[in-house]
Image (cartoon, grey):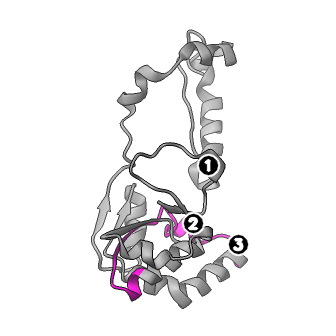
Amino acid sequence: ILTNDFDENDIEDYGSCQLYKASKLSNMLGLIEMSDIIHINGIWPVINNKVMKLCRENEIKYVVTPRASLMISDINKSFYKILKKWVSWQVYMKKNLQHAAGFHVTAQNELTDLKQFGFHAPVALLPNGINIAEYHELVDKGCLYRLFPKLKGKKSFLFFSRIDPKKGLVLLAHAWGQIAKEYPNWH
């Protein structure tokens, strides 16, 4: 795993998998050349484009998971962001994405927007790989109830995401506010 988001002081046991901090890696190409295929998550970080460029120049296959970064709603932001992304697109992004061996998206709306760019590589629509049933029995509800006593004996709904207008948190809050009194057993 090659990443920018890595704290050497917080290392977990990943078995045979190794973590590399991109900013400290002196031979990124060497690491890439040892791989049969590269999976890139996200498209706008500079390091991701550096990896795509190295793969492209050295004919190493790579699959890109845009993580909604090519959705029209994500691109159409402030003038500065539009300009910055337009320049990036013209200079290197489009070329890097045109050479991807494939794409992985996690939602239908992401697939729809991706198709508008006209890439010819195959696209796989696959949800994130998590089986919620595996975690059902691991939850210590006693700890939860000690932290949030109002939840005891009630059903809970948890919104788990980054806060962004396109995630609809404000819409959810308004909707919940309208129906909460009808469902006193839900929190």
According to the picture, the residue beneath numbered tag 2 turns out to be 74
Q: Residues within 10 Å of mark 2 (few under 14, many from 20)?
A: few
According to the picture, the residue beneath numbered tag 3 turns out to be 78
Asked whether 10 falls inside the magenta stretch, the response is: no
- Magenta range is 55-79
The amino acid type, in three-letter code, at marker 3 is Ser
The amino acid type, in three-letter code, at marker 1 is Arg
Asked if residue 123 is positioned above or below residue 82 in the image, the reply reads: above
- In primary-sequence order, the first of circles 2 and 1 is 2
Q: Quadrant of residue 29?
A: bottom left
Q: Quadrant of residue 82?
A: bottom right
Q: Which mark is residue 162?
A: 1
Which residue: 40% across, 80% down?
55
Image side of residue 88 versus residue 34, left or right: right
The amino acid type, in three-letter code, at marker 2 is Asp
Q: Are marks 3 and 1 in contact (CB under 8 Å)?
A: no
Q: Which mark is residue 143?
A: none
Residue 18, image x, y percentages: 46, 56
Which residue: 62% across, 45% down?
10
Question: In the depicted view, which residue is nearer to us: 55 or 86?
Answer: 55
Q: Are marks 2 and 1 in contact (CB under 8 Å)?
A: no
Q: Farthest left residue?
A: 122
